[in-house]
Amino acid sequence: NQTIYLKDYTPFGWQVEDVHLTFALAPEATRVTARIHFAPNPGAPKQEFFLHGEELTLIRAAIDGQDITPEIDANGLRCAVPDGPFLWECEVEIAPIRNTALEGLYMSNGMYCTQCEAEGFRKITFYPDRPDVMSVFTVRVEGDEPVKLSNGNPTSSGDGWAEWHDPWPKPAYLFALVAGDLVAHPGKFTTKSGRKVALNIYVRPGDEGKCAFGMEALIKSMKWDEDVYGREYDLDIFNIVAVDDFNMGAMENKGLNIFNSSCVLASQETSTDDNFERIEAIIAHEYFHNWTGNRITCRDWFQLCLKEGLTVFRDAQFTSDMRGPEVKRINDVSDLRGRQFSEDQGPLSHPVRPESFQEINNFYTATVYEKGAEVIGMLKRLVGDEGYYKACELYFDRHDGDAATIEDWLKVFEDATGRDLSQFKRWYSQSGTPRLQVTETWSEGTFTLNFKQHTPPTPGQDEKLPQVLPIAVGLLNPNGDEVQPTTVLEMTEAKQSFAFDGLAAKPVASVLRGFSAPVVLEREQSREERAFLIAHDTDAFTRWEASQEMARESLMASVTTGATPDTDWLDALHKVVRDRDLDPDFRSSMMDIPTQSEIARLCHERGHVPDPDAIWAADKALRDTIAKRWSEDLPALLDEARVTAAYKPDAEQTGKRALGSKILGLLNRIDGGAAAQVQFDAADNMTLQLTALACLLRAGKGADALARFHDQWREDQLVMDKWFGLQVACADPGEAAQVTKTLTEHPAFSWTNPNRFRAVFGSLAGHHAGFHQADGSGYALLTDWLIRLDEKNPQTTARMCAAYQTWKRYDSGRRSLIKTQLERIVAKEGLSRDTSEMVERILS
Ligand code: B3K
Ligand code: ZN
């Protein structure tokens, strides 16, 4: 496998003036004819003419009308070309029906669709498949399918053909084509300057009833981007298509977004509140890419965070505005710790802007996306809201139409605000999670916070330099009043102190409000102070964090010394949960219990070897204790969380149901499933139905409900994914692998469908104690299937290999079991580039 380096970037030797493509569709033999005008790129060094191309059968190639015989290998094509501009003509044949990798042009349930990011276009025709080569595309689609779509605006159509023209120059990764028997759910939007835009969500016949929510989310996103960033849509039409077989969530192709059906189809009966919120966020995310990604794209794939970090940041802002900032921030931090911190503290750790890769698909990671978004959040905090939007304006003005870099992005901030960002830039190049230690001193009215930062070594980076850390803090008086509202301390040195004078009494500090920097905060703090912050902190995040800290300490004590749960914490938490002046959504978040894998990570951070069974037992003991201790209140709380109005997936109802689900989970531990059965029988929406089913399974009373659920939803693939996943998630640790294995024998298990594969094996990998059973049964089963899937779908296989990224934390028995499995994967003949890069990095 070849490694590609950021430092080797060279521009392509030609410009592509225009691209004309004709597709004569047929499942086994689609003909793709390309007519492309190339002209020498004056800014590029001299080079041989090379076009990417994979799995293409060349029928004919010609330059300026003369047939040629190019030299072709597994990666592409070389040939001699004239010195000046020339016309390239090329006809290839491809077989979409046999494309199981789901990259390039493929088929899903009889419909044609494409996925070209990052490097799928080279499986469609020979082309300079790199993001800095941008061109205007005209596309003709020929076939019997009633609906035929591509990027841009429709120009003309007739019997068996349709033509599209996209006036905006774009890189090939944003190309899309769809053809099939589809129905449109229409909508419309008028932009602020008066452009009338036709909107459509295309789905398979039968799914029309699940489009309304997505359409509303799209319209809200279009409006929000105008209001907040001044960004307007730029075509007459915007199409979304739902596809059942898709490697990831969705794709921002210009004017033709393609979505995994799980990320767009929604209904009260079939989708949970979490699904609704996620769908709203993904629709917004893909739409926002129209400016941050499409109008301004990336020079090369090392700059991926330029579009992804920024667009994640923008969709998080959108969700905050739609649903409230507090709980959104709490959820994002949980997610960051769950996925990004594990990645950044193990063998797969890499900078937000990586410096090398073998397979770019392996770098669509939590680090590039979520840490990338955290970096933008820090930048915004440092320059302030005004500076931030001023810099963004400048970015859009200066770089519209460009394939840009992180340097370009930081420069607009420097130019707009006058700030020097050279040290800040380390966030893009230095990998690993910084540890931030804080101690405090108090003397004669002066309170001082003393910070030390240090980032442990990560692969390829032994020495780390200090980062710029915006640390948001507030101070509370012993009576609970805030004496110092949130202020941002800017730490730039390895060690730095910040003093607050003129205080009448020693305050309690609330540190890292809003999780203002993605660090591990190390702070010795008394339980009294933490309980005080749970009761009084004015910042929702640090208030939640104080409870998380107490939860983590309690669980760690159980795991390492067998201690019983900390009842001081439970009592402090109880007060918040019972406080009806607080939002149900926030009360529900306050009840979050750190996940078992988070406790495993914490054990590792503190030099203990995590014992999955002990962690499982500590988690169970904690939940049982809470249930008993709060038992008298649970029925009333459940009642309070009941929604009587007609179902709406809005923040208010969602918050209530979230609280209700947490309460039901506790009640379930003392009533043996009675309340869950009542809820299951009466449920008129998927949130209530699914939580009740989970409780019944956990109470060992799920057989009947599971069968009823199956009979009710057997025709709905997205709901059946939940049916599959939940059984694994709710299995006892000793049974998780067996339950998984049995499910793979179910007639509805389709391993080539990524959603179904992930539903089953993602749940197994996410079941900490179940996956890490000491007999290695979870490892062996997952590995068998990864080896099998790699032949069909390398991208999804490679992604699932990340289940093993934490392997070095565990005891020697588990380590050697996992190592054996990883070596089995590597030994597989013909292993994909995707999977071999991942496994080799994990093993290193
Ligand atoms: N840009 C796509 C992701 C493509 C992943 C390719 N392996 C979706 C998104 O981030 O919006
Ligand atoms: Zn994105």
Image (cartoon, helix red, strand yellow):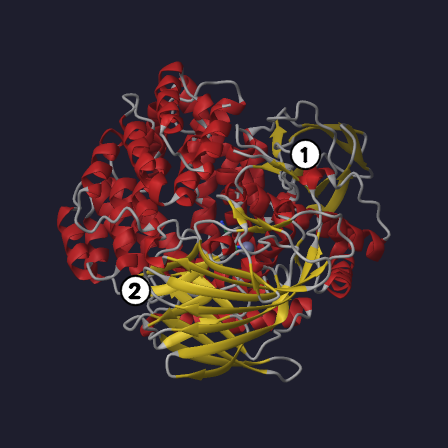
Instruction: State the mark number for residue 367.
Output: none
Instruction: Find residue 193 and report its image quarter.
Output: bottom right
Q: Which residue is mark 1?
A: 430
Which residue is outermost to the right? Answer: 418
Q: Nearer the viewer, mark 1 or mark 2?
A: 2
Instruction: Find residue 87 and report its image quarter.
Output: bottom right
Residue plotted at (37% across, 17% down): 816
- Position of residue 111 measured from the top left corner of the image (x, y, whole percent): 34, 65
In the depicted view, which residue is nearer to us: 563 or 629?
Answer: 563
Using residue 261 as the reference point, say whether residue 534 is left or right of it: right
Using the rendered image of the protein, determine whether residue 366 is visible from the camera's viewpoint. yes
Secondary structure beneath dot 2 equals loop
Contact between marks 1 and 2 (CB within 8 A): the answer is no
Task: Name which residue type carries label 1.
Answer: Gln
Q: Is residue 13 above or below residue 809?
A: below
Secondary structure beneath dot 1 equals loop
Using residue 121 as the reference point, say whether residue 232 is left or right of it: right
Q: Which residue is mark 2?
A: 110
In the depicted view, which residue is nearer to us: 439 or 274?
Answer: 274
- Position of residue 573 measured from the top left corner of the image (x, y, whole percent): 46, 41
Using residue 609 as the reference point, say whether residue 668 is left or right of it: left
Task: Name which residue type carries label 2.
Answer: Gly
Of mark 1 and mark 2, the one earlier in the sequence is 2
Q: Is residue 48 above or below residue 459?
A: below
- Position of residue 473 measured from the top left corner of the image (x, y, whole percent): 70, 42
Q: Is residue 682 above or below residue 162?
A: above
Using the rendered image of the protein, determine whether residue 594 is visible from the camera's viewpoint. no
